[in-house]
Image (cartoon, rainbow, N blue to C red):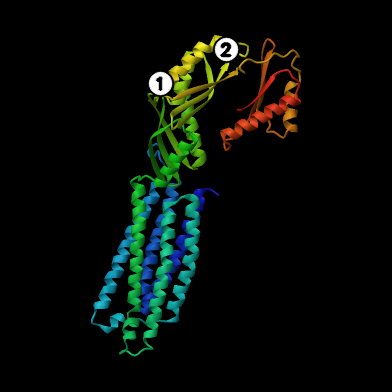
Amino acid sequence: MEHHVKKSIAALSSVLWSAVLSLLKLVVGLATGSLGILSEALHSLLDLMAALGTLFAVRIAARPADEDHPYGHGKVENLTALAETLLLLGTAIWVIREAVGRLISDDPAALRVDISLWAFLVILVSLIVDINRSAMLRRVARETQSAALEADAAHFSSDIWSSSAVLIGITGAALASQVSPDSPVYWLLIRADVFSSLVVALIILHICKVLGSAAINNLMDKTDSVLYTRLSDLMKSQMPTYPMRGLRVRSVGNSSYIEMVVGMPRDMHIDTAHEIADAIERLVSNNIPGAETLVHMQPEDSAPDSPDLLIRRIALTQRLAVHSLRLLETEQGLLVFTDMELPSQATLGVWNVPIQAFRAEVKRQLNAAAVYVHIEPSTRTLSEFNDPVPDDWEKRVQAAMAELKAPAPTSICIYTADKRRVCFVSLPMESSITVEQSHTSLTLLAEQLTLKLPAVARIVVVYE
């Protein structure tokens, strides 16, 4: 069911029940003279007006964005919630004024309440209705992120407490006739109804504070701290190479509008930057439903080289290839240890000068205590294969993958240079696994495929 349909049904149900309860409470309140029930009647009448306003608001909020309202019409729900707050504030002020007037009055009739069975029945019915209605409204409000329905739910949740207070008040007023007027208990019981009305007023004032603050914050586009933190953590965990330099978030109805400034290298091509911005927008929309994101890529100067990057740059100046860098702060100072690739048939004497130059430069620039190099043969050159590639090679790879119960490959590509060949088997990306897990599983799969398939090419398994 569409969100706006759910909200309309919930709001209409609220209107009907508010009308019934308002009429019942008003009739019984006038008949008994109970200020507690009358205050509840006024509360329910204002709830009826608020429910009508909510019904109007959710229908307006359901309208799509247009040229005059590019962010949609969702703010009307916050305006309605603010109007409800003002109505409730007026009710609380009237109830307090009336209660104080009765308490300080010299007329004994000001405290008299004619309690009947109907007074108890209407309050009990009100309690049952409000418990069910507030639960229904709160559920729909959370599903649809409706500020107006959330305000209604809060109203009717407070009605549960205020009706309970009134029930206690009229019970005390009914018991007053059974107690001697000279008893101290009589003084309390005869005023129980008025005290219950003050409790109702205080509950209403608390609701005014909560709903008013929420409505004003939304209308003033106050940043949602929870959403802000969630976005910051999302970018740090999923896009660590693109630092977030600025973030603005505004909520309109059940939609969030996010403006994000992200840093990028100054020399990055504009097409690449645009693709990265699209990827960030997809990331946000996938994790925060209903969010519309605009990403501004801000060019910035490259950060200073890290020790790892500096070592690699030094290696390149000497025409050397290094990997598996390790840096360790020891009691004797910084220790640098790296693997270095050299042609497998080369003699060490030929490469001794560049190796020593590399060690000296790393030691000098990093102020290292020691630099150790582990030399190993380069694996960058592909082996030669004499057998031709079978015509059904792709089918054989797919069959081998199925036998190994591996994911279905997205593509199988083989490249040839004379007798040197390499076959790339691409798999769907698994975003949740670690780099270590990925390397282990892909390496193992490549080894298993090599054993199962004819030796016609080097097999490399990669993610798409």
**Residue 429 can be seen in this image:** no
Q: Quadrant of residue 267?
A: top left
Q: Nearer the viewer, residue 430 or 113?
A: 430
Please name which of the two marks, 1 or 2, marks the residue nearer to the observer.
2
Classify 66 as above or below 348.
Answer: below
- 1 and 2 marks in contact (CB < 8 Å): no
418 to 334, vertically: above or below:
above
Please state which amino acid type lies under the numbered disc 2.
Leu
Report whether residue 296 is seen: yes
Looking at the rendered structure, the kind of residue marked 1 is Gln
Instruction: Please tell me which residue lies in front, 66 or 322.
Output: 322
Query: In the drawing, does residue 393 fall left or right of residue 54?
Result: right
Q: Residue furthest front?
A: 332
Q: Can you tell which quarter of the image residue 443 is in? A: top right
Residue drawn 24% across and 78% down?
Answer: 104
Q: Residue at x 75, y 32 (%)?
A: 403
Residue 7 versus residue 209: which sits nearer the camera?
A: 209
Label 1 belongs to which residue?
A: 365
The residue lying at 54 percent from left, 11 percent from top is: 351
Q: Secondary structure at mark 1?
A: helix
Place of residue 153 in the rendered image (x, y in percent of width and height, measured from the top left): 44, 59
Element marked by disc 2: helix
Q: Badge 2 is on which residue?
A: 348
Identify the residue shown where x is 68% and y is 27%. 446
Indicate which disc, 1 or 2, sits on the residue closer to the N terminus: 2
Q: Residue 261: where, in percent of width, then height? A: 39, 32
Distance (Cα) linking label 1 and label 2: 25 Å
- Give the image location of residue 85, x and y in percent: 34, 58
What is the x, y in percent for residue 361? 43, 17
Using the image, tell me which numbered label, if any, was put on residue 217: none
Q: Quadrant of the C terminus?
A: top right
